[in-house]
Image (cartoon, rainbow, N blue to C red):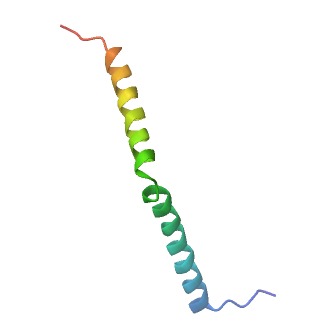
Amino acid sequence: MAEIVNLRRARRDKARRDRENEADANRRRFGRTKAQKAADRQDEERARRTLDGKLIEKE
């Protein structure tokens, strides 16, 4: 026999899981120190400069 599911409770549980997932993503995105953000920016800049330095320009 199938399990009886309260749809209102299921919707609330799904909404709660969605909010928790969004909060977790925000913590990962915004919950970093200034030093970590600066280090990431430096790494991106270094990678961009390296790639630009190897670019062959057509005349």
The percent coordinates of residue 8 (x first, y second) are 57, 91
12 on left or right of 46? right
**Closer to the camera, 33 or 9?**
33
Residue at (38% x, 20% y) in the render: 50
The percent coordinates of residue 7 (x first, y second) are 59, 89
13 on left or right of 44? right
**Closer to the camera, 2 or 35?**
35
Quarter of the view holding residue 10:
bottom right
Screen quadrant of the N terminus? bottom right
Q: How many marks?
A: 0
Which residue in the rendered view is the most extreme toward the left? 59
Residue at (46% x, 54% y) in the render: 32
Which residue in the rendered view is the most extreme toward the top? 59
Screen quadrant of the C terminus? top left
Residue 5 vertical placement versus 59 (above, below): below
The percent coordinates of residue 42 (x first, y second) are 38, 34
Residue 54 vertical placement versus 11 (above, below): above
Residue at (35% x, 31% y) in the render: 45
The percent coordinates of residue 41 (x first, y second) are 37, 39
Residue 34 vertical placement versus 15 (above, below): above
Which residue in the rendered view is the most extreme toward the right? 1
Quarter of the view holding residue 53:
top left
Residue at (43% x, 40% y) in the render: 40
19 on left or right of 45? right
